[in-house]
Image: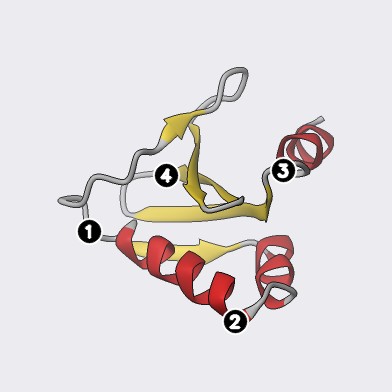
Amino acid sequence: MRIILSSQAEKSLRHLTKIDQIAIAQKIRSLRDSNIQLNEEKLKGYRDIFRIRVGDYRIVYRQQKQIVYIILISHRKDIYRILRQMMS
């Protein structure tokens, strides 16, 4: 499975602490393996968009057949506001 990060997700990831970067990178890598249970949740009001919790951060992504497109990575207090602005 191929993983693609949006430019905004990549920028957000670079601004995090190394510990948070490592935790998020591990969770993103685990998206490739369909055997691992990730506790993903579908976001209400959006079609085919899911989120995964990593501590105080959220990874918002869209999954298609063989591609996982990481839309946004941000702190839990900001993620839904930013996502709403992006999608409108």
Task: Check disc 2 and give the amino acid type.
Answer: Lys
Q: Please state, as top left, top right, bottom left or bottom right, where the C terminus lies in the image.
A: top right
Secondary-structure class at tag 4: strand
Whole-percent x, y for residue 60 in the image: 57, 45
Count of numbered circles in the view: 4
Q: Closer to the N terminus: mark 3 or mark 2?
A: 2
Task: Name the disc covering residue 63, or none.
Answer: 4
Q: Residues within 10 Å of mark 1 (few under 14, many from 20)?
A: few
User: Of the residues under marks 4 and 2, which one precedes in the sequence?
Assistant: 2
Q: Which mark is residue 18?
A: 2
Q: Contact, CB < 8 Å: mark 1 with mark 4?
A: no
Q: Could you say where residue 39 lies in the image, as x and y percent from the top left?
A: 35, 39
Helix, strand or loop at mark 2: helix
Q: CA distance from mark 3 to mark 2?
A: 20 Å
Q: Earlier in the sequence, mark 1 or mark 4?
A: 1
> Which residue in the structure is indicated by mark 3?
79
Check disc 1 and report the residue beneath it. 33
